[in-house]
Amino acid sequence: MARIALADCPDKAGKKVEVSGWIDIRRDHGKLIFVDLRDESGIIQAVVTPKQEEAHKIAAEIRPEWVVTLRGLIKERPEGMRNKNIPTGSIELEVHEIEVLNEAETPPFEISGDAYDISEEVRLQYRYIDLRRARLQKNLRLRSDFSHKVRQYLHGEGFTEIETPNFTKSTPEGSRDFLVPSRMQPGHFYALPQSPQQYKQLLMSSGFEKYFQLARCFRDEDLRADRSFEHTQVDMEMSFVTREQIMKVVEDMYTSVCEDMGYKIKEKPFPVFTYAEAIKKHGADKFDLRENEKESGILAFAWVIDFPLFEKTDDDTWTYSHNPFTGPKPEDEEKLASGKDIEKIISQQCDLVCNGHEVGGGGIRINKAELLQKVFEIIGHSPEKVDEQFGHILTAFKHGAPPEGGMGLGLDRMVAILAGEVSLREVQAFPTTSGGRTAVMEAPSEVSDEQLEELGLQIKKTKK
């Protein structure tokens, strides 16, 4: 007899079946023992009678979260005893045999509720148990569905999915890098990518005119509910496009994907605000256009454009407002080349906001070596430093780089919005805690002296 999913049991009335899963609830009524069995497809009520002597004896011992196989007969439940709240509520399993596959200790917390009131540290320590709860199962399946539909859409639009390296070079791109020491070149380090920014621009120089990937991005920054050390980005880039064409691709994709998943878009096409308009009207460049619709599954998307290319730092020097590769508007290209009227240079950046959150950013990139060099000059980098950190991409630009642009869209943040969650950790399988500890495996951790010696590293002890 082959195992079947619990969701398929209503179609098996009058037939013998084998099902497996976790004990959700056990209720001992003396002669009758009721068990709710749970697998990934759903839940079913099973009943064990004293007539099945061996099964009844085992049923008296089993406890919640034990993993078992039940064999028996699917029976229609009387009309007045049906549970209309679950898909399997019209039937129950008359148990003939019970096979215990694995016993379980008492769980550290209940998994029947939503868990918002349970300590995050404890939930993530036992994340494999936490993930059994219905809310998180639903969130991760929603994430899978969203990712699948995004891939489908982009493949349908002629994009090529290409993976870029996770070992790359440390370059200043806004956040701290996570560094990885090299065993083969002692004293040298790789960096985990904050985004695939430079690689996707190099792919445009390689002749791939439409690229995308669901890229892992790593940033050593302070953590909060909507920010984590690592996240997934729907990363895309296109050659020979305008900013408006990029915006249309993204808008059409998110409209198609989200509506296919049952969500309603508040306004189509997405409204467009300049940065100055957004600040004047909303006081920020990310805002919520919903009014009395905040719990209704409505998505209020909007674009923000025409940001300043540069902004002042606290010490009164210039830095880029988004990243050094963002291009100026064509009419401001001469200002950038001359280094004059820096505060008046407007970028071709476009940010996407949804329900009060920034969910993506991008635009037209710089594809000329001399202009990129000028950006680094304005923000105070020496020619030697620029050549050391960015010489590879400057050289690529000198070998025929096309005009291009694209977007990086935060997948975790968008899925959290769709799921109605505040924290990204509720839509990630094994996230880090707010204190930076990884789920279950408790990293970061110390390593052996032998490993340090192999890498040519020495730990500097600091006073507490």
Image (tube, grey):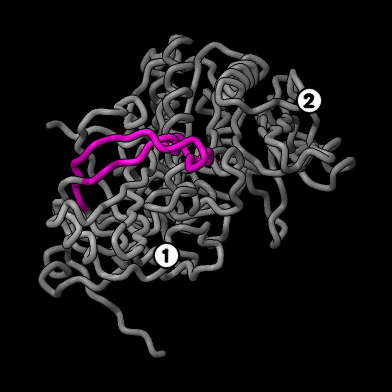
- Picture coordinates of residue 231 (x, y %)? 45, 46
Instruction: Indicate yes or no whether the magenta region holds residue 391.
Output: no
Residue at 25% over, 55% down: 188
Q: Is residue 132 left or right of residue 317?
A: left
Amino acid type at image mark 2: Pro
Residue at 31% over, 67% down: 442
- Picture coordinates of residue 381 (x, y %)? 53, 48
Q: Nearer the viewer, residue 357 or 398?
A: 357
In space, the residues marked 1 and 2 are separated at their CA atoms by 40 Å
Up-down relation of residue 195 to residue 455 (above or below): above
> Which quadrant, please, contains the C terminus?
bottom left
What residue does disc 2 label?
Answer: 271
Q: Dot 1: what SS? A: helix
- Picture coordinates of residue 9 (x, y %)? 32, 32
Crowd tier of the residue under label 2, counting other residues whose Cα lies within 10 Å: few below 14, some 14–19, many 20 or above: few
What residue does disc 1 label?
Answer: 123
Up-down relation of residue 158 to residue 52 (above or below): above
Q: Dot 2: what SS? A: loop
Q: Quadrant of residue 430?
A: bottom left
Residue at 41% over, 36% down: 88
Q: Which residues are magenta?
A: 68-95
> Which quadrant, please, contains the N terminus?
top left
Crowd tier of the residue under label 1, counting other residues whose Cα lies within 10 Å: few below 14, some 14–19, many 20 or above: many
Residue at 58% over, 13% down: 241
Q: Is residue 341 left or right of residue 175?
A: right
Instruction: Indicate yes or no whether the magenta region holds residue 82.
Output: yes
Amino acid type at image mark 1: Arg
